[in-house]
Image (cartoon, helix red, strand yellow):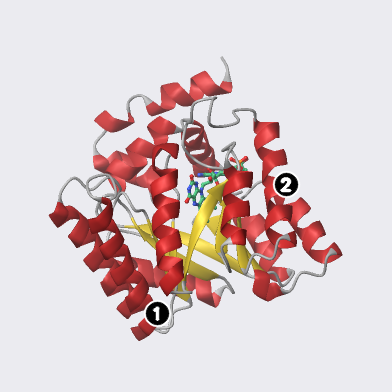
Amino acid sequence: MSVNLFNRLLVAPIPYLPKSLVWPLSRRYIAGTDLDSAYSAVNDLNAAGCSATVDVLGEDSRTRDEAETARDIYLAAIEGIERNSLDCNISVKLSDLGLRQDAELCFAATRALVAAANEHGSFVRIDMEDSSVTDATLDIYRRLREEYSNVGTVIQSCLRRSTDDIKNLLDSGPTYIRLCKGIYLEPEIVAFNDAGQIRRSYCELLEQLLAGGVQKVGIATHDPALVEFAVEYINSKKINQTRYEFQMLLGVAESLRGRLVAAGHPLRVYVPFGERWFAYSVRRLRENPEIAGHIVRNLFTRS
Ligand SMILES: Cc1cc2nc3c(=O)[nH]c(=O)nc-3n(C[C@H](O)[C@H](O)[C@H](O)COP(=O)(O)OP(=O)(O)OC[C@H]3O[C@@H](n4cnc5c(N)ncnc54)[C@H](O)[C@@H]3O)c2cc1C
C-alpha cells in the first residue's frame, strides 16, 4: 500500500471520531483552547531559548461577529503577551478576520491589530492562505506597510508567482517575509506539485530575499535539506542575525530545532491555540493527509 493511500485511510474517519479521541493526536501541535495555555507554552519555549508567535485557530469567518470575535482575542493576546513579559508576537489569517466576506472590514480589523501591536512594541505576521486570496492578502499587507513597520507576511515557494511577488515587495520598500513551502493543495497551473521543485524554488527565493535586501526573513521549514542550505548560505554570506530567524511549528522536528538554537541561531515557534482546534485539525488533515502520517508517527517516535 502506498504511503499516500495509507495516510488517506488514516484521515477518513477523523471527522466522525469523538473529540476526546482526536485530541491526543492534535495536542502535541496545539497549545490548548485558551490564552492561558498559549502563554504557558510560550513561557516554556522562551525558557528554552526560542521566541514564539501565537495563532488563534480559525479561518473563514462567516459573519461580522465571528471576524470581530477573532480580532478581540488577538487584541487580548497582544496585551497579555506584554503583561506576561513574553518574547512573542501574533500570526493572523485574514479569512478569520473577514477577508472572504468584506475586504474593507478585514483591513480595518487587521489595522486595529497592527496599531495595537505597534503601541505594545510588538509585531503582526499575516499568514498566507490558499492562492484564491494571495492578491487580496498582499494588497492588505502593502496598505498596512505604508503606515506601519511592525507587520510582515508570508511567501509560499510552491507558487509559480512567488519570484514576482518578492520582486514587487522588495521594490516597494523595507519588507518582512516568512518563507514557507505552502500547506494548501493548489492546481498545477498556479503551483509546483513536485517536492524537488518546491525545494529548489525555496532555495532560490531565500537567496532572492537575502541578496535583495529583505529587512528580515523567517525561514519556516522543518526540512533538514532546506535548513542545511539556509545555514550554509547565512554563514558563507555572513548574514547578520537581525536579518533572519528560523521558524518551526509547535511539536514538530524538536531535535532539529534544539540543534539550531544550540548553534546560536534565532528561532521562533508557531503556537496555535483556541476553541476551534477540532475543525482546524480535521480540515488540515483532509487537505494534507501526509500530516496524519506525521501525527501518527509522532505518537510513537520522537523527531
Ligand atoms: C512557522 C511556520 C509558519 C507557517 N506558515 C504558513 C503559512 O502562512 N501559509 C502556508 O501555506 N503554510 C505555512 N506553513 C506550513 C508550510 O508551508 C509547510 O506546509 C510545512 O512547514 C511543511 O513543510 P516543511 O518545509 O517543513 O517540509 P516537509 O518536507 O513537509 O517536512 C519536513 C519534515 O518535517 C516534519 N514535518 C513537517 N510538517 C510536519 C507536521 N505538521 N507534523 C509533524 N512533522 C512534520 C517531517 O518529519 C518532515 O519529513 C508554515 C510552517 C511553519 C513552520
Residue type at tag 1: Asn
**Badge 1: few (under 14), some or many (20 or more) residues near its Cα, within 10 Å?**
some
Residue at the image point whose x is 59% and y is 74% from the top: 49
Quadrant in the rendering for residue 74 = bottom left
Residue type at tag 2: Glu
Quadrant in the rendering for residue 40 = bottom left
Quadrant in the rendering for residue 273 = bottom left
Name the side, left or right, on which 291 lies relative to 95: right
Q: For mark 1, what is the residue? A: 118
Residue at the image point whose x is 67% and y is 68% from the top: 261
The tally of labels here is: 2
Which badge, 2 or 1, is on the more N-terminal residue? 1
| Residue 277 visible, this angle | yes
Q: Quadrant of the N terminus?
A: top right
Cα distance between the residues tagged 2 and 1:
32 Å
- Residue 121 vs 108, above or below: the answer is below
- Residue 293 vs 40, above or below: the answer is above
* Coordinates of residue 280 in the picture (x, y in percent): 33, 44
For label 2, the SS is helix
Residue sticking out furthest to the right: 236
Residue at the image point whose x is 22% and y is 46% from the top: 101
Name the side, left or right, on which 213 lies relative to 282: right
Decide which of 7, 229 is in the foreground and name it.
229
Q: For mark 2, what is the residue? A: 204
* Coordinates of residue 236 in the picture (x, y in percent): 86, 63
* Coordinates of residue 257 in the picture (x, y in percent): 63, 60
Residue at the image point whose x is 43% and y is 60% from the top: 141
**Badge 2: few (under 14), some or many (20 or more) residues near its Cα, within 10 Å?**
few
Decide which of 92, 55 is in the foreground and name it.
92
Name the side, left or right, on which 92 lies relative to 33: right
Decide which of 264, 164 is in the foreground and name it.
164
User: What label does residue 287 carry, if any?
Assistant: none
